[in-house]
């Protein structure tokens, strides 16, 4: 899995967009970018993933740069319930049994 | 659709006692995992299963055993609990299909061993 770098922490005002960056300069052509989050005292939760095109679902949008060396997770209208640690993971979508490895992630705090 | 359900949510054990944590998933996934998470730390893989009747060791398997007798259930056993096993335990099941590779986690079991 390619190494990822994320800021340790970020703040965002409630109702504003939260933009969480992730650098993955060593990403390989067949590796996907996945985002998970872990709200305090809860299990990790899948948010979104993508290969090279921008993706959007009901939770968030994922913007991947053209060279694929970085990406941004966007929560369009952050709420207090979005306060969590956000993890960017780069890995091959594979049938092997490899575990999911979380780095240190970004602590997002949504402020009222 | 319940997803991944873990039982119990909380438990306090005395050193040397045994217990079994149950993980149930209703998504028909082949892969299931048991992780532990210590305060301020990331997830560490204990054991995993790639299908009914098969299990394998992960990163930190010592002191734990698992069984996958039915596809929907993955059990984690502690035969003789130790204070070092105080942790939050998460179970996950995994969907893999083409470009999709997503793990779905339960809410966790908070275990204290005194």
Image (cartoon, coloured by chain):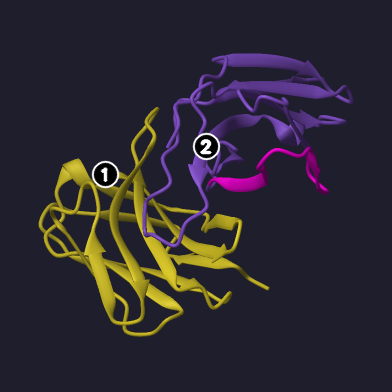
Chain colours: A purple, B yellow
Characterize the local packing of mark 2: few (<14), some (14-19) or many (20 or more) Cα atoms within 10 angstroms. many
Does residue A6 lie above or below B112 as drawn? above
Q: From the image, tell me which residue sits under label 2.
A: A90
Image vertical order of residue B5 relative to residue A66, above or below = below
Task: Tell me the CA gap for discs 1 and 2.
Answer: 30 Å
Residue in the picture at 51% in, 35% down: A28
Mark 1, residues whose alpha carbon is within 10 Å: few (<14), some, or many (≥20)?
Answer: many
Residue A48 in the image: x percent, y percent? 69, 45
In front here: A103 or B5? A103
Q: Which of B85 and A11 is in front in this view?
A: A11
Which disc number belongs to residue A9?
Answer: none
Relative to B95, B30 lies left or right: left
Mark 1 on the same chain as mark 2: no
Q: Can residue A34 be seen in this view?
A: yes
Q: What element carries label 1?
A: loop
How many numbered callouts? 2
Question: Which element type, helix, strand or loop, lies under badge 2?
Answer: strand
- Residue under pointer 1: B86
Vertical placement of residue B75 versus A38, above or below: below
Q: Position of residue A84 (x, y in %)?
A: 62, 31
Residue range in magenta is A44-60
Horizontal arrangement in the rendering, residue A64 relative to residue B73 (left or right)? right
Q: Which of marks 1 and 2 is in front?
A: 2
Residue B56 drawn at (x, y percent)? 23, 64
Subunit that carries the residue with mark 2? A
Viewer-closest of B68 and A40: B68
Q: Which chain carries label 1?
A: B
Who's the residue at 41% across and 40% down the image?
Answer: A101
A103 is within the stretch colored magenta:
no
Quadrant housing the C terminus of chain A: top right
Quarter-of-image position of residue B64: bottom left
Q: Residue at x 52, y 67 (%)?
A: B5
């Amino acid at each position: 899995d390619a190494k990822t770098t994320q800021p340790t922490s970020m703040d965002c005002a409630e109702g504003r967009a939260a933009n969480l960056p992730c650098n993955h300069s060593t990403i390989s052509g067949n590796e996907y970018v996945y985002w998970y989050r872990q709200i305090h005292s809860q299990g990790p939760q899948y948010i979104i993933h993508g290969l090279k095109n921008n993706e959007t679902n009901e939770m968030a949008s994922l913007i991947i740069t053209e060279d694929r060396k970085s990406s941004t997770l966007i929560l369009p209208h952050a709420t207090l319930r979005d306060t969590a640690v956000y993890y960017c993971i780069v890995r091959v979508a594979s049938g092997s049994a490899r575990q999911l490895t979380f780095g240190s992630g970004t602590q997002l705090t949504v402020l009222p | 659709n319940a997803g991944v359900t873990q039982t119990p949510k909380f438990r306090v054990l005395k050193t040397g006692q045994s217990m079994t944590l149950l993980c149930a998933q209703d998504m028909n996934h082949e892969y299931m995992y048991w992780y532990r998470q210590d305060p301020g730390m990331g997830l560490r893989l204990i054991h995993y299963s790639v299908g009914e009747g098969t299990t394998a060791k992960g990163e930190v398997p010592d002191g734990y055993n698992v069984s996958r007798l039915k596809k929907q259930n993955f059990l984690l056993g502690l035969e003789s609990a130790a204070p070092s096993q105080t942790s939050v335990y998460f179970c996950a099941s995994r969907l893999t299909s083409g470009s999709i590779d997503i793990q779905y986690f339960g809410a966790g079991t908070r275990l204290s061993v005194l």
